[in-house]
Structure formats: C-alpha cells, structure tokens
Image (cartoon, rainbow, N blue to C red):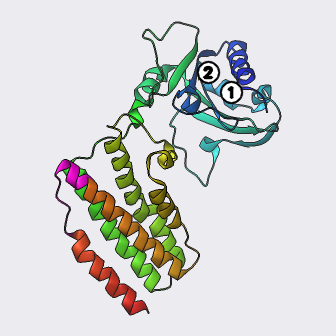
Amino acid sequence: MRSRQEMMDLGMQFAHSYEQIRLFTLEGSLTNVNIPPDEFQDYDFSYFVTDMEHFKRSDEWIDFFGPRMILQKPEDMELFPAELGNWFSYLMIFEDGTKIDLTLIPLGEVGDYFEQSDGLVEVLLDKDNRIKQPVVASDRQYYIRKPSARSFDDCCNEFWMSATYVAKGLARQEILFAIDMMNNVFRPNLLTMLRWKVGMDTEYTLSIGKSDKFLQQYVTREIWERLLSTYNMVSIPSMWAALDTCVALFRETAHQIAKQYQYSYPAYDAKISPYIDHIRKKSN
C-alpha cells in the first residue's frame, strides 16, 4: 500500500497536470487531528474544474492514480439515485489497497462547497488565489451537543414507540422485521442517549466519530459489554434479551441526564413497559 506522502504527492501532481483544474482540496478523516491515522483511511480529493465534460467523457484519466480493483461512479448509477447535483464522484480502490474518493466540482460552485462543508477541509492548491481567508480543518461541527428538554423528550418518545415495533415483530415471529426495527429505528435512540451522556461527562468538547465509533473510549466496560450484547439477534429469545438490555440501558442513562439537567423523565416508560410485557406474554 502506498504511503500517505506518496498519495498526497500523486494528488498534487494530478492537479498540476490539467489546466482545467484550478483548486484542489482534501477532506475527511485525513484532515482531522483527533483521529489516529491508519493505513485504511481514504483519500478524499476534490478537484474544482472549468470543464466537467472534459473529464466525464472518458475514464482513462483516472488511470493516472494506478491500476484499480474496482471503480464506482455514484452519479452514473440507475439503482441508486444521484445526490450531488452537478458534482461527479469516482470511488476507487486500487490494487495495492489504497482508496481514493475523488470528486469533480464545477469551479463556479466553490462558494456552495465551502458553505456545505462540515469543516474538515484543507485547501492544498489554489491556482487563482480564490480562497481569501485561511481554511482550518476542524471537527467542531460534529461535537456532541447538549440536548434541550424538548429533544430529550423526543428521544424518549421515539425510543418507547419504536420498542413496540420490535416487540410486535418478535411476537409474530417476524425476526427480519424485528431486526430491521431494532437496528434502524429503536437502538439509534439508545445510542443518542449514550452520546448525550458522553457529552455531559466531557462538557461537550468532542465528537465520538461517525457511527459512534469511539464510544467505547468514554463508557465503562460494563456498559460497553451490555451494549454489544444487544447485537446478538440470531434468534427470537436472543432478541427479547437484547430488547430488555436496551430498555435497561436507556432507562438508566436517561435518568442520569434528566437528573443533571432537571428534565422530567416522561411517562412513556411507565405506560409502554407493561404493554411490551403484555405482547411478550401473548406470544408465548
């Protein structure tokens, strides 16, 4: 696998090779000083160009970066609708394992790019001195934020409402439905509550990363092991156990946050918990 310096040099060489490229930026985890570097990080390159069609006519130019295992062009797929407007991206994994996510952006949309930026951007080349103010990469936009009383109540509401979906799926022996509800609707609210607890404990001075990937660093081993146990969904009994564990973790964490901020812990728990027990008994 090529080194970071080799890839950055290659990206810069490519930018200098085309008159149509006027601006070159790096995005993502490589700009984030709070993420430990490793060999699996992607190179998120964006090139601002004067002629999009010059590049879109053929894919031969991307051979500059080396032989590929696979190429994906999200804006040129039928099954998955395009989402980038006038931008065009190339997701590439090369034979040495290096991955580049390369995006072409019309030069006229530089302003939109920085307005939409999440803050994790470095300007590597600006041929026309378009960027007048220093751009400093920061993950501050992803810092955990203190929940308002309304947000806290909304999270509790969604957690207890979606718990009934999981329970009904299990009662009907519809395990794929129950798994889908567990992963995509129900458990995310538990993770939100745990995230707020981390924020509370760290005075909202950090991010725990995409998909809460650094959560383990900020919770006790006991909580971490209980949380991981909820991903055991290989059977109906194991899913009932996962549901119970999620409920217990959520209840404990929500009470801690409510106490700290003097929020009311809503009555959803008291009313829905017996209802879930009723569903479980009916399914036996």
Amino acid tagged 2: Asp
The quadrant where residue 267 appears? bottom left
Relative to 283, is 56 above or below?
above
The secondary element bearing badge 1 is classed as helix
Q: Which amino acid does label 1 sit on?
A: Phe
Question: Residue 272: image x %, image y %?
Answer: 27, 76
Report if residue 115 lies within the magenta region: no
The reply to whether dot 2 and dot 1 touch (C-beta < 8 Å) is yes
Alpha-carbon span between mark 2 and mark 1: 7 Å
Q: Which mark is residue 51?
A: 2
Specify the segment rendered in magenta: 257-267
Crowd rating for badge 2 (residues with CA inside 10 Å; few <14, some 14–19, many 20+): some
- In the displayed structure, would residue 188 be above or below residue 196? below
Left or right of 131: which side holds 51?
Answer: right
153 lies left or right of 162: left
Q: Residue at x 46, y 59 (%)?
A: 222
Is residue 39 placed above or below 128 in the rendered structure?
below
